[in-house]
Amino acid sequence: MSRAPEHRPHRVVVLALDGLLPFELGIPHRVFGRPVDADGRPLYEVVTCSVRPPGPVETDADFTVDVPHGPEALAGADTVVVPASYELGPVFEDGVLTPELAAALALIRPGTRLASICTGVYVLAAAGLLDGRPATTHWADADRLQRLFPRIAVDPDVLFVDDGDILTSAGVAAGIDLCLHMVRRDHGAAVANEVARRTVVPPHRDGGQAQFIRRPVPEPRSASTTAARAWALGRLHEPLQLRDMAAREAMSVRTFTRRFREEVGVSPGQWLTGQRVERARQLLESTDLSVDRVARDCGFGTAQSMRQHLQAVLGVTPTAYRRTFRAGADSGLTARL
């Protein structure tokens, strides 16, 4: 009789540095700490460590955090997350690691996935891990990051950058987007969407969405594109036209397009494509519909069109995507929160 494979959750280690922002420290615990499999076993194990022996770590608030692990925890990590800190010292000022931080990072095994939230990117940059790579941070720090580390391709206009084994994000809420993106990458859209629902945040904001949106909340009595977006989401299977969306808000196409970009950060066409890709992911994971039917139901029209869009966004074909994430679903993988 064969033994069932031993359950081993993916280990996420969060590196807490002095001056850390409590909100951003809590993001990985909130997002990765929720999903479990069909047997109620966690898909992730999340622990927090310091560069020093266990003990208090200063925050930017009026309290400290008692961190239970020292740097040795990094040696067993599958993913390391570095949240933002306001007291990075020579890392932020001169782009060099302190001896204790360098010693801690040296414990990380080759091949470990690395991620940063906001100014946590300076740690990865000072370690030379981002040389020749794309990265992002909070838009207010992007110019400084680029000057200090000219070998990095800094993109100040996106929420996060996924460069495979290293991921970087902008500040605060973008850290949630990044962690949800990693869950989606690991276990598919259904698991990530359920985590988002429980966390009461949007299930998916594409990494390429702009950081700085001029009108995130409509001014009182000002026109908005909210109703048009809700209307379009219920009709993704139809060949939607920009003029039809603008008509829902009684705007000209030009005014609607400008207002849409101000509120959402991308053009109406980019937003529609992103919503259709997300819908296709959900159908490929959760149904047995043919690829042709999924393409029609998502508004792509043809399987070839959907294949091109998924290849551009996800780097895989619809069939490959379904094979990857339906395998998990068929084995009972879920996110019962």
Image (spheres, grey):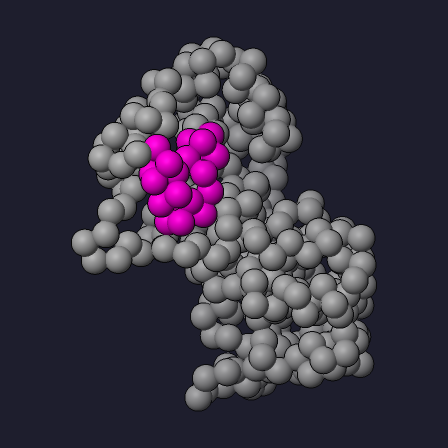
- In the image: residue 154, left or right of residue 288: right
Q: Main secondary structure of the magenta part?
A: helix
Image spot of residue 323 (x, y percent)? 57, 23
Image quadrant in which you'd find residue 186 = top right
Residue 334 in sight here: no
The extreme left residue here reads: 221
Image spot of residue 29 (x, y percent)? 48, 62
Count of numbered circles on the image: 0
**Residue depicted at 50% across the width and 83% down the height:** 60
Residue 77 in sight here: yes
Residue 300 on the magenta span: no
Q: Nearer the viewer, residue 168 or 191?
A: 168
Q: Nearer the viewer, residue 225 or 93?
A: 225
Image spot of residue 7 (x, y percent)? 57, 46
Per the rendered image, the range of residues in magenta is 253-274
- In the image: residue 250, left or right of residue 182: left
Which quadrant of the figure contains the N terminus?
top right
Image quadrant in which you'd find residue 139 = bottom right
Q: Nearer the viewer, residue 196 or 94?
A: 94
User: Vertically, is 328 above or below 40?
Assistant: above
**Residue depicted at 37% across the width and 49% down the height:** 263
- In the image: residue 156, left or right of residue 294: right
**Residue depicted at 72% across the width and 77% down the height:** 91
The extreme bottom residue here reads: 62
Residue 271 on the magenta span: yes
User: Vertically, is 333 above or below 209?
Assistant: above
Image spot of residue 261 (x, y percent)? 42, 44
**Residue depicted at 69% across the width and 45% down the height:** 164
Q: Nearer the viewer, residue 279 or 275?
A: 275
